[in-house]
Image (spheres, grey):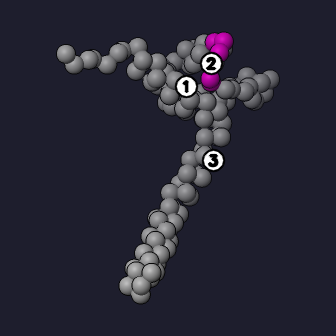
Amino acid sequence: MDAQQELVAQLVGLINQLVDMRVEEMLKPLKAELQLVKSLQSEWVDTKEALKITGIKTAQTLKRERERPGTVVVFKMEGKMCSTPRYLRASLIAYNEKKTQHRISAYPLPTSK
C-alpha cells in the first residue's frame, strides 16, 4: 500500500467513526421515546380508555370480546368485590393489529391484467 492509499483508508475510518457517533446521537431521543412507549404498553387502563383504543362502541361488546375464546384482550377485575375490569394496553393494541390484519386479508388486492 502506498502513502496515498493509507491516507484514504485512514480518512474512511475517521468518516465511519464520525457517522457512527452522529447516528448514535440521533438515536438517543428515539430510544427514550421507545422506552416510554413500552412502559405505556404495560399500563392497565379502564373500560372508557379501552373503548377508545379498540374503537369498540359499547362496554358490552368489549365484555363479549374479552370473554371470547382465543381473544388477545387481557383483563383483570379490580375494585370492591372485583367488579371493575382493567385492560392491558398492549393487549388492546394487539387486538387492533389483529383486527386490521383480518380486514386486509379479507379483501384481496386487485390484480392488473
**Numbered disc 3: secondary structure:** helix
Give the percent coordinates (x, y) of residue 87. 64, 30
Q: Which residue is mark 1?
A: 95
Q: Which residue is mark 3?
A: 39
Picture quadrant of residue 78: top right
Q: Using the numbered discs, state the Cα–Cα distance from disc 2 to disc 3 in whole angstroms.
A: 23 Å
Q: Earlier in the sequence, mark 1 or mark 2?
A: 2
Picture quadrant of residue 15: bottom left
Q: Earlier in the sequence, mark 1 or mark 3?
A: 3
Quarter of the C terminus within the rendering: top left
Q: Using the numbered discs, state the Cα–Cα distance from disc 1 to disc 3 in whole angstroms.
A: 18 Å
Q: Which residues are magenta?
A: 68-73
Give the percent coordinates (x, y) of residue 93. 54, 32
Structural crowding at the residue carrying mark 2, measured as other residues with C-alpha within 10 Å and reported as few (<14), some (14–19) or many (≥20) = some
- Tell me: 53 left or right of 84: left
Q: Which amino acid type corresponds to the residue marked 1 in the rendered image?
A: Tyr
Q: Which residue is mark 2?
A: 71
Question: Which of the two residues, 24 or 77, is positioned nearer the viewer here?
Answer: 24
Identify the residue at image location x=46%, y=18%: 102
Structural crowding at the residue carrying mark 1, measured as other residues with C-alpha within 10 Å and reported as few (<14), some (14–19) or many (≥20) = some
Residue 63 visible to an observer of this rendering: no
State how many labels appear.
3
**Magenta-colored stretch includes residue 72:** yes
Q: Which amino acid type corresponds to the residue marked 3 in the rendered image?
A: Ser
Quarter of the N terminus within the rendering: bottom left
Identify the residue at image location x=44%, y=77%: 9
